[in-house]
Image (cartoon, helix red, strand yellow):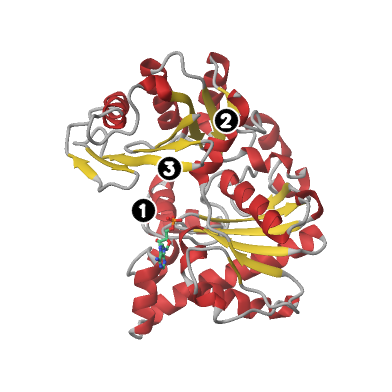
Amino acid sequence: MKILVINCGSSSLKYQLIDSESEKVLAKGLCERIGIDGRLTHTPSGKDSVVLNDPLPDHEKAVSLVIEQLTDSENGVIASLDEIGAVGHRIVHGGERFASSCIITDEVIEAISECSDLAPLHNPANLIGINACRRFMPEVPMVAVFDTAFHQTMPDYAYLYGIPYEYYENYKLRKYGFHGTSHSFVSKRCAEIMGKPYKDLNIIVCHLGNGSSITAVKNGESVDTSMGLTPLDGFLMGTRSGSVDPTIISYIAKKEDKTIDEVMDILNKKSGVLGISGVSSDFRDLQKGMEEGNERCKKAIEMFAYRVAGYIGSYVVAMGGADAICFTAGIGENTSIVRELVLDRLKALGVTWDSEANKKRGEEVKLSKDDSKIDVYIIPTNEELAIARETVALVK
Ligand code: AMP
């Protein structure tokens, strides 16, 4: 079956067409600057990318252009839309309502819309993508795969914040966690690599990318994760601050005569390693800066690694021990200096690791030595494939 995977943002739409039997990507692409001007980059498997600068006034036009490209006589990979067996949509926030993926119905759309309060930038964009696809492919089954669903197994003492309980009861203010598709995919793959039942393992997954989160997966279930009500929680990321003393928000607002929204914008877009380094949110630039003697780039990398190691330590305790630690996503898979700094701190947990193996990147690698108390791996994530697998499982 051919599965179209859609990841819709407020001004972008990423897609992949995946053959579920071979798990090969037949074509992938990105629509950018939707509602501004518009650009589509379409890459059929084994061929060069095509860039179209056609106007994209809305997501509906973007979906129609994607369909045109997928079925194009030159750049296309299918003869007609009839070949698409199902569409899998990435949905950011499923609140407490969704603990697993589900077939999209009118009722599900309504429930996703009700979660928009918790993810005002993401869920409305995800819904626009669903509605646009439904209009062009009314007969094709569609599946919603939630970033939050995997974490619905967390115990209440892990997900509740230390604020009056009424805020949880009235507004559902609690930790939800994100990147669930990636944490689930990588932890399952880790169990396969280790050749042990998933349900028998305690695994810590470090999804380190522009957005980063760490999850404790105990016996196949998420029991704690670093992101919270929103993806701003946790530790410093590319441009996000992660957790800070909440007093900082009112302090900056008063000192700089800013509104709460303006301060939140700073915490979301101008903080993290970008804010610390003053150079970039990209670890390749930070590493270059550090090698050239830029102290703030060095500080940003050290802060990041220190916090990652801290979460790992606390999750070993949360699970009563860990069998494996996995590094994944852009930084986790590629940036050996970050892994090195984290692994150095993990000596305290009896972790031993191979510095030659740590030079590798972007492939499955075992980093720990045989005498290590905890196995450590690089496992590349593949959220689109995970969404395609979930979609097939539900529509079959
Ligand atoms: P992601 O959000 O998972 O795409 O990760 C993005 C971040 O990963 C980038 O901002 C870089 O800091 C880092 N990254 C991606 N590719 C590489 C690479 N080849 N070498 C070093 N860092 C990388």
Q: Residues within 10 Å of mark 3 (few under 14, many from 20)?
A: some
At x 38%, y 72%, the residue is 286
Callout 3: helix, strand or loop?
strand
Vertical arrangement, residue 210 with respect to residue 391, above or below: below
At x 51%, y 34%, the residue is 91
- Quadrant position of the C terminus in the picture: top right
Vertical arrangement, residue 229 with respect to residue 245, above or below: above
**Residue identified by numbered label 2:** 392
**Residue 308 picture location, percent across and down:** 59, 67
Amino acid type at circle 1 is Asp
Q: Nearer the viewer, residue 79 or 28?
A: 79
168 on left or right of 265:
right
Amino acid type at circle 3 is Val
**Residue 246 picture location, percent across and down:** 56, 55
Callout 1: helix, strand or loop?
loop
Q: Residues within 10 Å of mark 1 (few under 14, many from 20)?
A: few
Q: Quadrant of ligand 1?
A: bottom left
Callout 2: helix, strand or loop?
helix
Mark 3 CB in 8 Å range of ligand 1? no
* Residue at mark 2 to residue at mark 1: CA–CA distance: 52 Å
Instruction: Give the mark, 3 or 2, whose residue is nearer the N terminus.
Output: 3
376 on left or right of 241:
right
**Residue identified by numbered label 3:** 25
Instruction: Give the mark, 2 or 1, whose residue is nearer the N terminus.
Output: 1
